[in-house]
Image: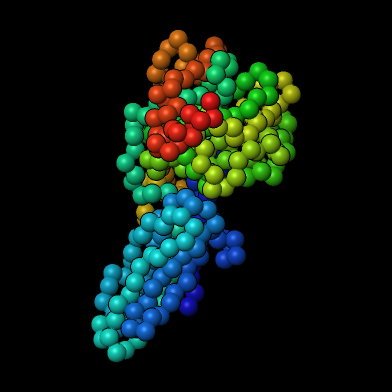
């Protein structure tokens, strides 16, 4: 049997192009196991603990009545996806399958009132710019109605902190800063999945200065890395975008063209807590926002065990 492998990767600003990848590079692999009672279990192993939507299409199916296409959520590093049960228990099941995956929980219950902290040290001055949609400017595509992405800048190189609790699910740490480019896709990125199923991308980190590992749980204020400079006369930046999986129409993902592919992700406009302003929706401004937080914001999603550990560290 031959499986078709498609994985949607995020490139901030050039959003979102699913690509075909070789099986040895694929972040989720499936194996099947036929049991003594002729049922067939589908198991998966993954390279990170984050959530993926798995679409399995069954074909050439015999001695088993079930839905031809099934959508299943997979999280953690391994687990079971589904079981095929034979109609006639004394006979085996004939089957073939292909599968497609995409990162995220399909239509998660997003906490729209959640308040984030700016991802820098308390008291820091941070400049904010709302980013435009690259494909609209260069490829004539329509800007998504919910599009939102920020660039956070500091006058000097500074440590980037987590704006919310989450699990690190992907890291790119291989690119040097390329001076003189208004935009380049060759940027280092940390991808974090939040407890409500949203996914945040910290894009533009300095090579060799990423301070977390895949699978690590981070908390508000945890050190992630260092921001970078792409123009000697400019500030030091990171781009910050929060998304969620809104579509599971993956059948034609591999044939999608860059200019026209379906948007699989929706965008979140986060609320932030800043000094002297309280909870705000950030806007592009020439004046800096001052980073601030409260104990309630820091501790909001921590478990009792995590709160106890944090208290012992003080």
Residue at point 34%, 72% (across, down): 83
Render colour scheme: rainbow
Image location of residue 58, percent across then percent down: 37, 72
Residue 248's quadrant in the figure? bottom left
Viewer can see residue 132 = no
Name which quarter of the figure residue 251 lies in.
bottom left
Q: Which percent across, then down, holds residue 253?
A: 45, 57
Q: Position of residue 303 (x, y in %)?
A: 40, 37
Q: Position of residue 103 (x, y in %)?
A: 46, 51
Q: How many marks on residues? A: 0
Q: Residue furthest bottom?
A: 90
Residue at left 60%, top 65%? Answer: 24
Question: 276 or 139, which is in the foreground?
Answer: 276
Residue at the far front in the pictured view: 312
Q: Tell me which corner region of the image, top left, top right, bottom left or bottom right, holds residue 156.
A: top right
Left or right, 141 with respect to 159, comes to left
Q: Nearer the viewer, residue 105 or 184?
A: 105
Q: Is residue 21 above or below residue 107?
A: below
Up-down relation of residue 66 to residue 120 (above or below): below
């Amino acid at each position: 049997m031959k499986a078709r492998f498609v994985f949607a990767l995020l490139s901030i600003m050039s959003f979102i192009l699913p690509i075909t990848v070789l099986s040895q590079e694929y972040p989720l692999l499936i194996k099947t196991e036929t049991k003594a009672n002729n049922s067939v279990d589908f198991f998966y192993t993954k390279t990170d603990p984050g959530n993926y939507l798995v679409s399995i299409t069954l074909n050439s199916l015999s001695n088993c009545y079930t839905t031809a296409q099934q959508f299943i959520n997979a999280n953690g590093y391994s687990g079971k996806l589904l079981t095929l049960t034979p109609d006639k228990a004394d006979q085996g099941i004939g089957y073939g399958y292909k599968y497609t995956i995409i990162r995220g929980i399909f239509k998660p219950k997003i906490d729209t009132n959640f308040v984030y902290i700016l991802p820098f040290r308390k008291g820091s001055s941070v400049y904010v710019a709302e980013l435009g949609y690259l494909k609209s400017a260069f490829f004539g595509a329509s800007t998504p109605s919910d599009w939102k992405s920020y660039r956070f800048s500091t006058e000097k190189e500074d440590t980037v902190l987590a704006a919310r609790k989450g699990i690190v699910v992907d890291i790119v740490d291989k690119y040097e800063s390329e001076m003189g480019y208004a935009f380049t896709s060759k940027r280092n990125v940390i991808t974090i999945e939040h407890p409500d199923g949203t996914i945040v991308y910290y894009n533009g980190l300095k090579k060799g200065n990423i301070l977390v590992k895949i699978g690590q749980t981070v908390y508000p204020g945890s050190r992630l890395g260092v921001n970078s400079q792409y123009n000697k006369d400019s500030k030091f930046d990171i781009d910050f975008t929060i998304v969620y999986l809104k579509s599971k129409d993956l059948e034609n993902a591999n044939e999608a063209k860059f200019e026209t592919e379906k948007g699989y992700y929706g965008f979140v406009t986060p609320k932030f807590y800043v000094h002297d302003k309280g909870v705000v929706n950030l806007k592009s401004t020439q004046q800096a926002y001052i980073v601030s937080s409260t104990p309630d914001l820091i501790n909001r999603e921590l478990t009792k065990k995590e709160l106890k550990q944090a208290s012992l560290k003080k």
